[in-house]
Amino acid sequence: MCGIVGYVGRKQAAPVLIDGLYRLEYRGYDSVGIAVMDGKQIEIVRKVGRVKEIEPARGTFGCIGIGHTRWATHGGVTEQNAHPHRHKNIVLVHNGIVENAFSLREECSAKGESFCSETDSEVIAHLIADAYRGDLLKAVFEACRRLVGSYALAVLCTDEPDTIVCARMKSPLIVGRAKEGLVVASDIPAVAEEGAQLYSLSDGEFCVLKGEELTFFDTTLGEIEKDAIDFDLSDDLPDRKGYHHYMRKEIDEIPKVLSLSQAKITENSCFSSFYRVLCQTEYIQIVACGTAYHSGLCAKEAIERICRIPVDVFVASEYRYCDPIIPKGTLLIAVSQSGETADTLAAVRLAKERGAYIAAVTNVTYSSLTRLARTVLYTRAGREIAVAATKSFNAQLITLYSVCCALAEIRGKTAPPVGGLAAMAESTIVTGEQVRSWTPHFVGASSAYFIGRGADRYAAMEGSLKLKEISYLPSEGYAAGELKHGTLALIEKGTPVVAVITRRDIAEKTMSAVHEAYARGASVFLVTCFEEFCRSPEIVSSVVIPECPPEYSPILSVIPLQMLAYYVSVACGHDPDKPRNLAKSVTVE
Ligand code: M6R
């Protein structure tokens, strides 16, 4: 989490840093700061809150500087804990976690050094200052050798007024040449501009931005060359295009994303060699977190039902600790929008060590996950800015369903084609607008429940995650049949319950759960393909979605649930794009 940015060049640094931080705010937004050097001194401005809090610092004088937007890990949300951190002549910003921070702090304290913050990051400034003998790069290198954990660093030194030194280990870092200077940032949008040449650092690499020169170093400080990366400005420069929030815009992009993803998947140069891997595949593991975990569950349903290949889906943060059994020939698919989720990366590293074939389903071309995987299946969701994942979920599903189709073909099974889902998503968005009228039942409710059977329960789980994440309403997504085994005790008069029913053969079974909830006073809402259930007097309101192959139905049924979460969040007066306590990309374990 956290976003870092840096600039050295001909322009004033502060506006470049602040504009860059706005574009990184999705990575964390509880506090913010910049440090700008005017040739001699470094001025630091830090505030609790979002980037707009440091707008008054736009006029800070100096052509070199670094900035940071924070998602708190070590230490509370306070100005002292906000970055940049300073010790003696060293000022730095850090994204990542120093796992041995406690012992390093004790070591520094024993030498009589004192700390101004509770963060793990401040200790890095101490290590660099202690190692400094007139060469900032060497001092950063020495300090990094002491660190256990993850870091993306940008470091200033008052003794080297035209230099920023950067280092990367397990946290993303982009550096580059822009029109009027050199730049560094956690992600492309912060520094993307027409004509920029951008480079992605690998773990253990360093980069020096000095005057007009960019120099790269490997893990032993040997100088290296790097290839510039491709980026797409239209994708990389965030634009709300007239929408109040990115989340609503991103939901409307789902049909386009589905057609693009579906068209591109088999064109992917990796796909033919991956097809050969699929020919050998007898067992699949999927690891992911949050929404991506739910897309893994949906994929399991489709692959097992259609291809009869066993699939286990793991929450990535648990995978390492369950000593997973990884039989020879296991295909492990890691699903991650950002490709930077630390838990997912850790699970992948373990599976790789134990011999699994790693395939990645990710939305970010130069992410850490792409470096670990042997096959990368890019989802074509485009940049997703809202913290709540929407279009990326649908893109993951169509990609995983396409893998399912390939597996079915290999196995001589018949998989329903995925074509047509984009058009169905379009009409689902139109009818989905009806959920807006449901919001008064959710605003002020003490909890909400989402139920379904088969694949519908995974759509229910994802709908529930969306709602709790951006409206802060306690919510559960449940297998409909489980309701009566405990959760029913929580239903009282007016409790909103959303039932998802898209599979004809088990529809009546889910309706039984609806009857049970209604009998205890629940206000029941329905997302279904079958109009007849909407006429039931127990249903307050319903959305009818197109009927698609039931194995694929979450790709449509989730859409009204995403819209519901959005409208409830807005009705509650929250910012759906930036829910409290969360960040888009979770780069800490
Ligand atoms: O980037 P990833 O897909 O790996 O992220 C995983 C989760 O952090 C993410 O899906 C999270 O649950 C979303 N905010 C949910 O909307």
Image: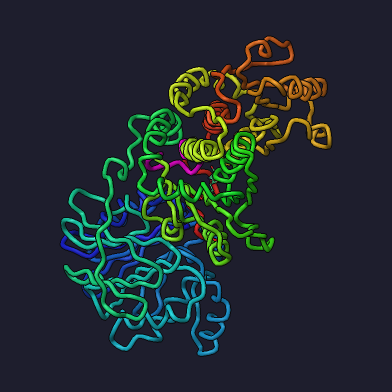
Residue 319 image offset from top left, x and y in percent: 63, 58
> Does residue 576 appear anywhere in the picture?
no
Q: Residue at x 28, y 49 (%)?
A: 231
Report whether 227 appears left or right of 278.
Answer: left
Residue 471 image offset from top left, x and y in percent: 58, 37
Colour mapping: rainbow
Residue 201 image offset from top left, x and y in percent: 34, 65
Q: Nearer the viewer, residue 522 or 122?
A: 522
Quarter location, residue 239: top left
Residue 365 colored in magenta in the image: no
Report whether 587 appears left or right of 242.
Answer: right
Q: Residue at x 33, y 72 (%)?
A: 206
Quarter location, residue 42: bottom left
- Please give the count of numbered marks on the rendered protein: 0
Report whether 478 appears left or right of 178.
Answer: right
> Does residue 262 appear anywhere in the picture?
yes
State the predominant SS element of the stretch in magenta: loop
Q: Residue at x 73, y 27 (%)?
A: 495
Residue 382 colored in magenta in the image: yes
Quarter location, residue 534: top right
Report whether 528 appears left or right of 88.
Answer: right
Q: Residue at x 43, y 59 (%)?
A: 368
Image quadrant in which the C terminus is located = bottom right
Residue numbers of the magenta segment:
381-392
Q: Nearer the viewer, residue 41 or 434?
A: 434
**In the depicted structure, whether residue 245 falls above or below residue 174:** above
* Residue reaching furthest to the front: 412
**In the depicted structure, whether residue 559 falls above or below residue 125:** above
Residue 268 image offset from top left, x and y in percent: 37, 44
Q: Nearer the viewer, residue 48 or 304?
A: 304
